[in-house]
Image (cartoon, grey):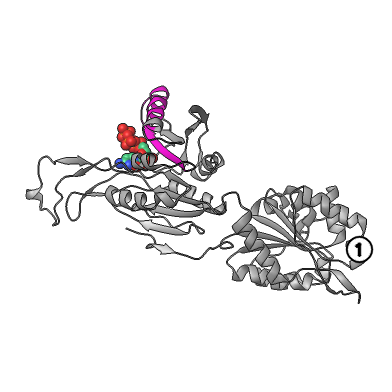
Amino acid sequence: MTGRPETQDQPKALLGRRILLGITGSIAAYKSAVLAREFIKRGAEVRVVMTPSAIEFITPLTLATLVGSPVHSDFTENKDSGEWTNHVELGLWGDLYLVAPCTAATLSAFVNGTCSNLLQAAFLSSRCPVAIAPAMDLDMYTNKATQANLKTLSERGVQIIEPQSGALASGLEGKGRMEEPEEIANFVEKYFTKELPFAGKKVLVTAGPTEEAIDAVRFLGNRSTGKMGFEIAGRLADLGAEVTLISGPVNLTTPPRVTKRIDIVTAQELYDRTVDIWPQMNAAIACAAVADMRPSTPSTEKLHKGDLPDSMRLENTPDTLLELGNMKTHGQLLVGFALESDTVEESLKSAEGKLKRKNLDMIVMNTLSDDGAGFSHDTNKVTIIQNVDGHNTTHVFELKSKREVAKDIVNLLTF
Ligand code: CTP
């Protein structure tokens, strides 16, 4: 078996998070270097986009060296070759677009949808949350236009990191100083810990196959790779959930922000570990491909060829999901999977039967009759049946990568 042993890590709010750091032309730009380093120190990946005037305050070389990737400041990377910077790709890359420092001019451009430099273009193209740390002189900050712009951006969902009071570059004293880098990093960390849709929620995900011993070296198993469950665990963790991933033997790395991974081998171990922690969970997603049968009397030794039986007595393994459904209390959300191999109509009927029998809120059905669905593919095609207050709703999805399928599944979860 591969993978990490059982671990219980500290919250890793910034680990692997992609932060697009925008720097505009303010004297506070020198602090952006410290900020970039702080993010890197906390495990984030950082890319930097600068306005032409920001370059007057701090060199791209300093930032590129700190974050380990080239800094973007112009629409064209290379004027001779005509190579351009893809602001759309930049806008889509980040989990957060943080503009620090953000000048009064950029603030106004964001409000008006102006697109006169790469940093502004990335703002218009970004799909991720945006945060800004304003930096300006006190009169500019208190000006009604600036305050109105801040209010507008805040109403549009932009996070505002309030400037602090103190000595300003103009020699005046007052509010307008960009917040200190460490505090901005704390703000962002808190954002990823608290503001995400599943923050504070505990979710259990089971994944991968189980192996049932025949003897010391042979087992009954199946071809599950665990990919679907790992993608779901990763997606939930990205959205702030505290995820415990219980996995059968797979060859996969634990997604970065998953809080705890428990490795199991048999259906019995899966049952014992899962049933034990289910009462503390807000939700469980059962993706594991559990062996339904196990040899009744496995040998602890390796059986030699001549000693192998012609037939083998099998017994049922415990049905973990069925037990979770029996134990489910008000407010807990339970999701199962159904791997079917019949026609679509028969498969749907079977999946609906499992949804009811196992007291589920949702079942994700995939059928082996769809090309590219099921085990050992990087893609999957699912139909999701959701039960709300006794009524079933069916959602049919196209063939997609398992990562995208995980997003579709997680989008339907409410708990
Ligand atoms: N499951 C489980 N424990 C088992 C068997 C299945 O927890 N011993 C869970 C799976 O993780 C999945 C769901 O039950 O979420 C349905 O699994 P599936 O193999 O499709 O259905 P079964 O209940 O085993 O029924 P059948 O084999 O008749 O299709």
Residue 78 coordinates in the image, percent (x, y): 75, 60
Viewer-proximal residue, 78 or 127? 127
Residue stretch rendered in magenta on the structure: 332-354
**For residue 99, above or below residue 214:** below
Query: What residue type is disc 1 on?
Result: Met
Viewer-proximal residue, 357 or 405? 357
Q: Is residue 278 left or right of residue 85?
A: left
Residue found at x 56% / y 41%: 411
Res. 375 visible in picture: no
On whether residue 313 falls in the magenta region, the answer is no
Identify the residue at the far front of this view.
Answer: 330
Q: How many marks?
A: 1
Res. 32 visible in picture: yes
Residue 323 coordinates in the image, percent (x, y): 34, 42
Viewer-proximal residue, 366 or 188? 188
Label 1 crowding class (10 Å Cα cut-off): few <14, some 14-19, many 20+? Answer: some
Residue found at x 47% / y 35%: 381
Return the residue at label 1.
Answer: 140
On whether residue 339 falls in the magenta region, the answer is yes
